[in-house]
Structure formats: C-alpha cells, structure tokens
Image (cartoon, rainbow, N blue to C red):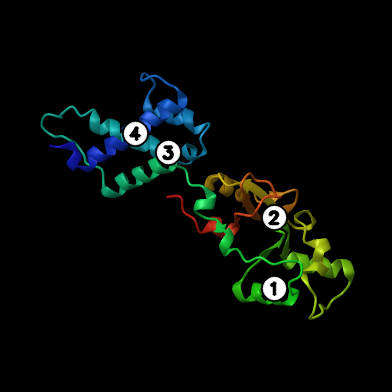
Amino acid sequence: MNDKKTNFGEFITIYNELDEFMRKELNQDYWVSHSDLIRQLAKKNKVVKIYMDELLSFARLRNAIVHNPDKRHAHPIADPHDYIVQKYEKILDNIMRPAKALETIAVRDKKIYTASLEDSALEVMKDMNKYAYTYIPIIESGRLVGVFSENTVFSYIVHTGNLSLEKGMKIREFAEFIPINKHESESFEFVSKGTLVIDIEEMFAKELKQGKRLAVVFITANGDPKEKLLGLVTAWDVAGYRED
C-alpha cells in the first residue's frame, strides 16, 4: 500500500517534521527519543507545553503503527482518522508558526474607536452605549495619552462630588482621570507587535495585577507607550479566539 495515499502517510510526515524541528530547537542527536524531545521542549516553549499530552499520545500512536510485527500482511496496522491528522497538522503549524496577536485577535488601528481631548464626552458615551465599547483610547498628536471608560466617569464623580455631567463637557475635563496609571480598578499593558497570542492569553489569565483587573493590552511597534498604537486586545478578544 502506498503510504502517501493514506492518513498514515500524512501522519508520519507530520511526526517527522515535528521531530526535525524539535531536534534543531534543542540541538539534540537522534538517539534522544521523540517523547523526550517533547518533554524537554515543553519546558521552554509555551505552545508545546499546552499540547504536550496530545503530542505524547500521537507519538505513542505512531510507534504502535510503525513497530508493526505483521507489516508484511497488514500495513498499516491502523490508519489515523481524518480528524486526528488534521488536528496534528494544526498543532504542528501552531508550534512552528505560532500566531501573533496583532495578526489574529487584535483590533487593528484603523478599526479602533478613538477620541481626542476636544471631543464631546456625551457623544463619546453615547457611542460607548450604542456599540458596547468599554474602553476608548484617547489620542493626541498620534499618541495614546489615556483611556476613557466607565471607571473614568466614576472616578471623576467621586473626586469632584459632581453627580451630574454638563452637556457641553469635553473629554479634556476628565484629563486627570484618563492616564493609564490613574485608573483605580483596572490596568493596561503595552506589548510589541511580535507578541504571540499565547503570551496575551497568559497575561489575561493572571488577570489581577496589584489588585487591578487587566482591561486592555495595547500593541505598538516595540511595546513603547509613546509609539503609534497598532492594535489592542481585550479579554473578549481572547475569549473568542481558539488556538485549535
């Protein structure tokens, strides 16, 4: 039987590609077993760590098929299901080409709803209510100077004692409370454009930082807050993403 026409053939090809990749990553000789490579790489590669149990299962399946005592009469002894082959291939792709947040889950710069200090606070809040926006980046001269949120309004009311907001108020009047370090119950982080999805997921998984909830992860070229905003990721973006 021609292996290339079977799922078995594709399965073995994926196994071999992964094996070669891991040996190069770890600089290991061929006497080190495939399963040991998985365990070693899982200690330094977050993606491999996530899929370690499945990869070890696939390694055992490969060994059971390859080390077939009746190969002359029954080869392959078993043919992996389409779903297993597709899943193995997807995992391999995630390991060799891990997804970057900016290219997958992030809201890109052109689609981000932003405001300036001179914009009407009421109009911004109307849009927040209409489109279910939670955090509005405030941009001045192409740079992020803060974030307008419900927390901003609450802090303004608590600190000023003003229970009503005037119709003509501009975002500027909340200037004391929009800087990212002035949000009392929420925090914001900056990462570079090359940051992986898995790293962003890990940041939100930790969730609490100094008693604050991570609200938004902003993406700039090098993770510098002074750089142009390229994208942003919220907990909702992470929740809606599936690596596999």
Callout 4 amino acid: Glu
CA gap, disc 4 and disc 3: 10 Å
Give the position of the N terminus as an image quadrant.
top left
CA gap, disc 1 and disc 3: 43 Å
Mark 2, mark 1: which one is toward the viewer? 1
Is 71 situated above or below 224? above
Indicate the position of residue 52 as horizontal and vertical percent values.
Answer: 44, 37
Q: Residue at x 52, y 31 (%)?
A: 43
Q: Earlier in the sequence, mark 1 or mark 3?
A: 3
Indicate the position of residue 46 as horizontal and vertical percent values.
Answer: 52, 38
Callout 1 amino acid: Val
Q: Residue at x 51, y 59 (%)?
A: 240
Q: Are marks 4 and 3 in contact (CB under 8 Å)?
A: yes
Residue assigned mark 3: 96
Mark 1, mark 3: which one is toward the viewer? 1
> Badge 4: few (under 14), some or many (20 or more) residues near its Cα, within 10 Å?
few
Q: Earlier in the sequence, mark 4 or mark 3?
A: 4
Q: Which mark is residue 213?
A: 2
Q: Does residue 179 appear anywhere in the picture?
A: yes
